[in-house]
Image: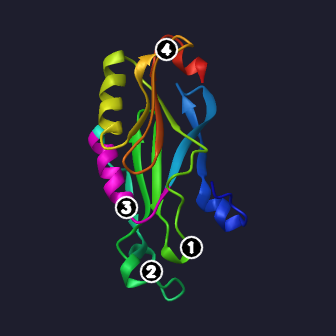
């Protein structure tokens, strides 16, 4: 595993966006939203995630949208994604393409997984089947030792996921 050495590498290695939310107009709590770096295929990956989770993109910004006299964008990166946002339930999945000038993202890192908790066993099966298609399954959907219905896998874009259903699944995290 390549360990990041510089602040720039740490930024590219993993990002988490935290922002406050209001629940039922009473409690102000932070949410944690995964922010994924891709090597030029963020749009393809997010169209795949949209086909599995549903919903619509909240925002798509391309590098060319930010181009100015102070911020030149190489032609081959103009249509790459600077920011793409897909709301999923009460959370948001966010990503960007990493410009070639900043180096490649290690697509085989295994420091983190995106955990998805479902409301039904059927939804867990559906998300597992969709997200794991073309990927590598580490643990298929099955009863876990901690009493939930659980799976662990890497999708076809190298992103690691867990899908889980069961009483108090969120409490198990």
Mark 2 vs mark 4: which is more N-terminal? 2
Bin the neighbour count of mark 4 within 10 Å (Cα to Cα): few under 14, some 14-19, many 20 and up: some
Q: Is residue 17 left or right of residue 46?
A: right
Q: Which residues are magenta?
A: 37-51
Residue located beneath label 3 in the image: 41
The 10 Å Cα crowd at callout 1, few under 14, some 14 to 19, many 20 or more, is few
Q: Residue furthest left?
A: 51
Q: CA distance from mark 4 to mark 1?
A: 41 Å
In the picture provided, is 7 more to the left or to the right than 26?
A: right
**CA separation in Å, label 4 and label 3:** 33 Å
Magenta stretch prevailing secondary structure:
helix
Mark found first going from the N terminus, 1 or 2 = 2
Can the viewer see residue 54?
Answer: no
Q: CA distance from mark 2 to mark 4?
A: 48 Å
Q: Disc 1 to disc 3, how far (Cα)?
A: 15 Å
Identity of the residue drawn at 46% across and 23% down = 164
User: Which numbered tag is attached to residue 148?
Assistant: 4
Residue 34, image x and y in percent? 53, 45
Residue hosting label 1: 102
Element carrying mark 2: loop
Q: Earlier in the sequence, mark 1 or mark 3?
A: 3
SS class of the residue under badge 3?
loop
Crowd tier of the residue under label 3, counting other residues whose Cα lies within 10 Å: few below 14, some 14–19, many 20 or above: some
Verify CB contact (< 8 Å) between mark 2 and mark 3. Answer: no
Judging depth in this view, the residue of 105 and 42 nearest the camera is 105
Residue on which the image places disc 2: 67
Question: Looking at the image, is mark 1 or mark 2 nearer the viewer?
Answer: 1
């Amino acid at each position: 595993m390549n360990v990041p050495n510089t602040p720039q590498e740490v930024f590219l290695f993993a990002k988490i966006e935290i922002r406050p939310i209001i629940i039922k107009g009473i409690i102000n709590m932070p949410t944690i939203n995964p922010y994924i770096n891709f090597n030029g295929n963020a749009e393809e990956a997010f169209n795949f995630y949209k086909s599995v989770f549903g919903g619509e993109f909240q925002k798509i910004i391309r590098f060319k949208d930010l181009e100015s006299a102070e911020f030149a964008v190489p032609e081959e990166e103009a249509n790459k994604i600077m920011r793409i946002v897909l709301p999923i339930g009460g959370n948001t999945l966010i990503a960007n393409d990493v410009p070639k000038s900043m180096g490649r993202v290690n697509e085989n890192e295994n420091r983190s997984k995106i955990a998805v908790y479902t409301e039904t066993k059927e939804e867990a099966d559906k998300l597992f089947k969709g997200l794991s298609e073309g990927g590598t399954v580490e643990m298929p959907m099955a009863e876990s030792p901690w009493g939930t219905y659980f799976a662990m896998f890497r999708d076809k874009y190298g992103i690691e996921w867990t899908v889980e259903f069961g009483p108090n699944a969120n409490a198990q995290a």
